[in-house]
Image (cartoon, rainbow, N blue to C red):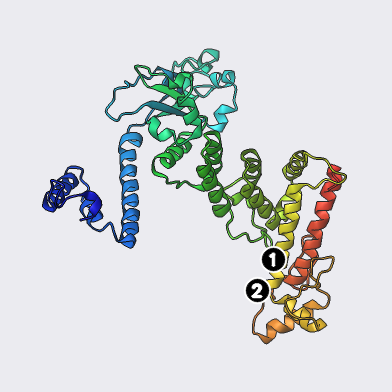
Amino acid sequence: IPTELGGGPGTGFSEDEILEGIAKISNHLEIPSLWDAVLQSDDRRLSRQRRTEEVERGRSQLQTWFMRNVIKHKFIVDTGKAEEVEWDSNNGIFADVLLRADQPLEKDFADRPTDEILQTPSMKATEGLLNGIPIGPAALQSRTPSRTRPVQKSTLFPVHRAMLLRSEFFLTMFSSGFREAQSTPHLQIIPIDCTPDVLETVLTFLYTEKADFPLEIAVDVLFAADLLLIERLKQKAAVVISTLGNGTMAPASDLQIVGTERPSVESDNIDIYDVVRAGWLTRVPRLEEFGARYFAYRLEDFIDEEEFADLIKESAGRIRGRQETDSIELLDDIRYYLSERFRLRFEDSGLEDMMAEEDGNVPGEPRLEEDEGVDVSGLETKMQETRLDNGEDGGVPQFNGAIRTLDGEVAGDEFASDAVNYQILLGKIDALLERLKLDA
């Protein structure tokens, strides 16, 4: 056995007695691996492997405990009665506090005034008698508003301060003189400005270090993590948005075929405008870069929208130190990724090597022109011949239609269309700046 455990001559305990004591402790604490951990502590490789296994096992056990003692005991009440809930501080799951999250009302009801909802007819108005049932103003006034207006619900989670302390928000709250830090006979209720699904995601991360949530609530999780000062969860939310929301990053209209419709950007699961603003508010550069790249790869779908112009104005308003000619950060990033979008298209097609052979230049050295190295003069015939020699059509339909540019003109092939589209989009950016009277 290891020498630090003692035993042997002069210690008063024999090795057999020490090993027997380790076995008793292992059985009492239900740690079957304690025996091997003590006897094989000199092997560093096995020690690292055992530590990894024990950490994973501990997290799994904690997740099970969290589901049984927190999620299982959450309950839903009417928002108006949430403050009346009394949960004894001496409870079987050792909860210290109740966290409250309100379920938002449906948008249709949230936007309607209360008087209008109360005046909603409870029965269909008809002319003449209706089997003795009274009709008229008395019947139109609903006596039970709850039948037309849903009651807002709140979800209460019994949680433990020891786990909430991982958040600097709760650490400050419970270590100060705030009311929430005082001991009371019943658990104090702390409202959190988020939905129940978001709060459950936050608690899952605090208890189990796991953050698995769908893209639909990722922005809300980001704001909640920023509110509660949980930096790691905020970064995880940013990764979810920029990864799941990224998709293939294929532009919405690489090929414009006569008689076909462009796909709509409304099918996306995120509001890119909210994502960019969330990146600004929560100070997450990753989301700002993601938003700029998202816009650049779908710029033809957004450039004419009024909300896009408003976003550019907001970005211009964020400039702190004024210079002779200011740089709008969002617009600069969009220009960069727009150049990348079209440059990669030509690099993937081998255009640069072909142009280098034609001009006698060394392949791999970019030819920089006003159009970012894209020179398509005389390119149509050469590219068509190359595709025919290789037995390919380059993915360009050659029947029942033609490739069109963004301004509706027919292009020779997709490469000529890309070159024209690039210049059109740059021109629209300049026109937008001129319309907004921004010099950037």
125 or 87: nearer the viewer: 87
Relative to 167, say whether 25 is above or below.
below
Q: Quadrant of the N terminus?
A: bottom left
What secondary structure is found at the residue carrying circle 2?
A: loop
Q: How far across and how far down the image is residue 298, in percent?
A: 69, 56
- The single residue placed furthest to the bottom in the displayed view is 389
Query: Residue 403: x, y in percent?
Result: 73, 68
Asked which quadrant contains residue 196, the reply is: top left
Within 10 Å of disc 1 (Cα), the crowding (few <14, some 14-19, many 20+) is many
Residue 127 at least partly seen = no
**Which circle marks residue 381 in the picture?**
none
Query: Which of the two discs, 1 and 2, labels the residue nearer the N terminus?
Result: 1
Mark 2 burial class by Cα count in 10 Å: few <14, some 14-19, many 20+: few
- Please say if 76 is above or below 368: above
- The residue lying at 30 percent from left, 61 percent from top is 43
| Left or right: 17, with 96 as reference point | left
Q: Which mark is residue 255?
A: 1
Give the residue furthest to the top.
Answer: 138
Q: Where is residue 365? Give x, y as percent.
A: 76, 75
Give the percent coordinates (x, y) of residue 279.
63, 43
- Identify the residue position indicated by label 2 in the image: 395
Tell how many labels: 2
Which residue type carries mark 2? Gly
Residue 14 versus residue 249: which sits nearer the camera? 14
Horizontal relation, residue 350 to residue 62: left or right? right
- The amino acid at mark 1 is Leu
Circle 1: element type? loop
Residue 222 lies in what quarter of the image? top right
**Residue drawn at (54%, 15%) of the image:** 136
- Going by the image, does 363 lie left or right of 50? right
**Of 275 and 34, the residue lying toward us:** 34
Q: State how far apart marks 1 and 2 are (Cα).
A: 9 Å
